[in-house]
Image (cartoon, coloured by chain):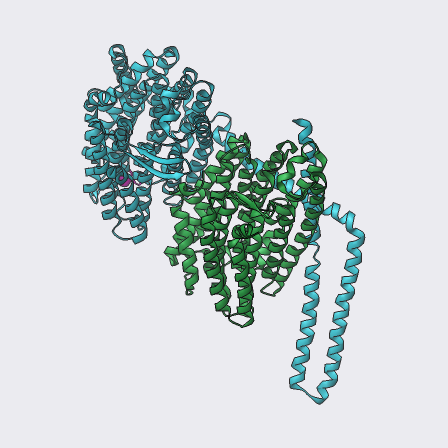
Chain colours: A cyan, B green
Amino acid sequence: MTMLALTILAPLLAGIAALALRRAPEAIALWGIGTGFLAAMTVLAGAVAGDAAQLVLPGLPQMPLRLVASPLTAVISAMVATVAACVVVYAVGHMRSDPERPRFFGILLLFVAAMQALVLAGDWITVLAAWELIGFSSYLLIGFWHGRDGVPGAATRAFLYTRSADLGLYLGIFVLIGQAGTSEISATLAITGTPALVAGLLLLIGAMGKSAQVPLQDWLQRAMAGPTPVSALLHSATLVAAGAILLIRVAPMLPGGALLVVGLVGGVTAVVTGLIALAERDLKRLLAASTSSQYGLMLLAIGAGVPVAALLHLIAHAAIKSMLFLGAGVFQHDRNSTDMEAVAGAGRARPLVLAGFGIAALALAGIPPLAGFFSKDAVLAAALAAPGAAWLAPLALAGTVLTGAYMARALRVLWQGEAQPVSGKGMGWMSAGMAVLTALAAGLGFAFAPLEHLLEAELPPEGTAMILGLAAALSGLVLGWVIAPARLMGPVLPRAQRGFAVAGGMDGLVLRPALAIAAACERFERHLLAAQLGLVRILSLGTASRTDAADNRLYAATLDLGRLNLRLGDRAETTDTDGIDGLIFGLVDRTIAAGRRLRLLQSGLIHRELALTVMGIAVIAAVLLTVPIIS
Amino acid sequence: MARDLSFLFPELLLASTVVLMLVAEMLRAPRLALIFGLIGLGLSTALTLPLLEADTSVFGGTYRVDLLSGWAKLILLPGTALALLMTRAEIAGQDREGSVYALLCLVTLGALMLAGGGDMMLLVLGVVLTGLGSFAMVAWPRDDAATEAAMKYLVFGAVTGSVMIYGLTFWFGGAGSTLFSELGALDGKPLIALAGLVAVLIGLGYKAALVPFQFWAPDAYDGAPVSVAAFLSVITKVAAIIAFAQVLRDLPVATGWPVVVALIAAVTMTFGYLAALVQSNVVRLLAYSSVAQAGYFMMGIVALGTSPLALPSVIVFGAAYVAMNLGAFAVIMIAGRDLDDFRGFGRARPVIGVAMVVFLLSLTGIPPLFGFVGKVLLFGAATEAGYLWLAVIGILNSVLALAVYLRIVVPMYQAGDGDAGRTEVAPPLLVVLGATALVTVLMGLFAGVFPG
């Protein structure tokens, strides 16, 4: 129980300390992430031993907050802790010359704490809270270099995209809580029938936003404006995994109809974003598109009814993709860019990094005996055995071919070209982080058998899937290496490069309508005010002109009074020059000021606003009168 | 009689405290008035605790001592004590200082009348009592802005108040009683029910600054001392919301009031945040933000009678709102009224800067802060009552809310001109900041102590 709390509290406290103390952020971060890692491993060991830890806090009335370390959540939590530890170690080297390090490590650790809370959550309120927090810290981290061109826009876009999809999560959770009468996740999964279908589809929308599924994929590629460790942790292994994790956890509740939708969304995403990755001209954006594509494969496996296959691929992908991003970060360091032309040949100068990158790339493509081979097999086998196999299997195979193709392309770019001299500063930390991730990407597959045993899951037979998958992966690799994307994709290329912007893409669906509504609101308000003014003027013209006249008279009278005083003063000047003079002028000034104040009170603003209020009352009364008639 | 009075100890104590404070002010001892006020408020709060479980009404059903009024006292009395400390920090040593303290407590007494009223007469009494003291406090600085603001506040109050009293006579005529508990008799008399309902919406909507009765709020808050604005934005508003709950829970749903209240809620929160987006004066920005928050409150009112979450959501969000809004105003007292005053503030004063970020994020509804808990309950209540569209508008508006509050947060961490927040912070303000920040941060995790 203490360990369970420590999994979240250690990074949380370290994050706060880094932000508050603003010194030695690296040491604080390493302590926090290390302690969190040890705690997560202890929790996992406990779960393996059959001792599931649980923590209940008071929380809302009758809805306590729960943290639960079931085998499933403990495994994911250990995965998050491991990748986070590797990325933080790498970041110590990568960010060493950035003056804003405390802010970076502070927010990164806060993110890790929120992510662990999301993974370990045992009730929906905690899920909501953690979901919001990871979104918010992601916004802060993407916008870390907020002074640079385009960065604030990218952060805002990511936040708005995922926020609009969050609407689905909120509504889905309200439906679940309303139906089950409790916020405990395990209890709500017993729901069946239409509510389960509706809730499942609503949750899918939330998951699509976070896991960057078509048509909400665009924000992820733009999020690459953030620092590399952020891309490696948030936008490959954790934040974007939240959607897939959510669906894996609710999978037992989803009825067949919802499963098919999940599978199709995933399959379409796997192919579409795979094509985008193949057409991409920037290394980090290629990896981002590939992330969407791989999460598409995971959703496909969930849709096929085998969430454990999705979990295996999630774990393998976390290690692989983090390594790929970290490697790309090194090349970016060397060439000051991630443009494909700029990084051409960058791998030659760093053979070790390229070797790690290559192992991870081959693992992602699904070459045995690397981790991705086993997990992708499981996904393919699930697709082949699913009720909707006719739809899902071709999409899964196409996704696999594309994976091989774009990874081969990335490798080829890094290999072919001129080597340039590089500096070795900070490489110690960076190498340490990458070495562990490469080892995991290579060897994690051998841990999958005990994992399946732990989760008491049975995977479909893999015979055909293994042969098909291997053939697809190899053909993809060969195609990607030998044939340039322009020839491979033909007429699809320019559209893929624009990110398949259907009808202006999500910008057209979300951003522009929102702006248009805002503009229309403003226009409407202006018209309303103008109409109001006209109405009030007509209604109160008589009274207004009369008050105006009275007001003017009063003003003139005060001025006259002032002049009178002045004249008195003139006369008095002859007898007394200094003292009385000042007194009188002061009096004049004060009377004029009083007149001004009177005018201010009669500015007419109150009338206008009261008229608006009366109009509002009329609307309220009208609605009240019509409601009983309608209902 | 004696039994009835025993349920009114907190109110009686507060009333006697106000008298003592006025005596102290006559003796020209404002500090004594402050001490009287703080002790009186503290004792009243303590006296409320044993009455929390009570569910009864006194004096022939005109005054309710129930869950709602009990929790209202637990929220409003400590809130007033914090507002007293803020006022002390702002106007210490100035003329007529003690009278402001007495007025604050008097307005709070009116707020308790609103929160516990079970009768139309008491509703009117509460509206008038809160109104008179508030006008005087807004006019306290005696400069142009304050005079104009108080004038506007008074004119609005006079118009809406008289319309409310006029409309309530219809209810009295229709139901044959001034008690809210007899309002069920209006079933089947739609026009009479409507007249009174419109009247109540106007009278209390003005107090709670709901659209379209919100026009006075930005001017009044801006003209008044910041601490008085803080007080008005929390105490009278929460009292009016709870009065809404007391009145409307007895009114037959067939009159269609939930639909109208839902519409007002939707328009209020949207208008409030849209208007707040264009403000450059932070007090006005928070004024419009508190208009929007009133809209969120009304989501809980809509669900009265149809969702068991309705009352808890109003109580929890009420407590959260009092803490975070008072805290935000306290920071404005340190930083300044203009948005430019906040440039670099977070760097110059890191601790207070973090506190401000906490208040603003809580106002947005970012977890795990107190405001988030309240909003989740409100959304849940509205959904359960069948107003899913209202919950959707509420969630969409919290995106807008983030944009509004980030307008303060972002300049706080930009490079400043260096003189931001150089002045010494008065100790009472530090107490207020500490208390509100603690409540905002911790109560989010322990909201289970509230009634469910």
Q: Residue furthest bottom?
A: A575
Q: Is residue B214 left or right of residue A225?
A: right
Whether residue A424 is situated above or below residue A321 in the rendered picture? below
Residue B38 location, x and y as percent? Answer: 47, 61
Q: Nearer the viewer, residue A451 or A535?
A: A451
- Taking the spot 43% from the left edge, 44% from the top edge, the residue there is B370
Among the 4 quarters of the image, the one containing residue A30: top left
The quadrant of the rendering that contains the C terminus of chain A is top right
Counting every numbered tag in the picture gives 0
Magenta region, main secondary structure: helix
Does B437 appear in magenta? Answer: no
The quadrant of the rendering that contains the N terminus of chain A is top left
Q: Residue furthest front?
A: B2
Among the 4 quarters of the image, the one containing residue A55: top left
User: Can the viewer see residue A85 in this picture?
Assistant: no
Residue A573 location, x and y as percent? Answer: 71, 86
Whether residue A509 is situated above or below residue B140 in the rendered picture? above
Residue B101 location, x and y as percent? Answer: 53, 63
User: Can the viewer see residue A456 in this picture?
Assistant: yes
Among the 4 quarters of the image, the one containing residue A233: top left
Q: Which residues are magenta?
A: A332-336
Q: Nearer the viewer, residue A402 or A370?
A: A370
Residue A189 location, x and y as percent? Answer: 38, 23
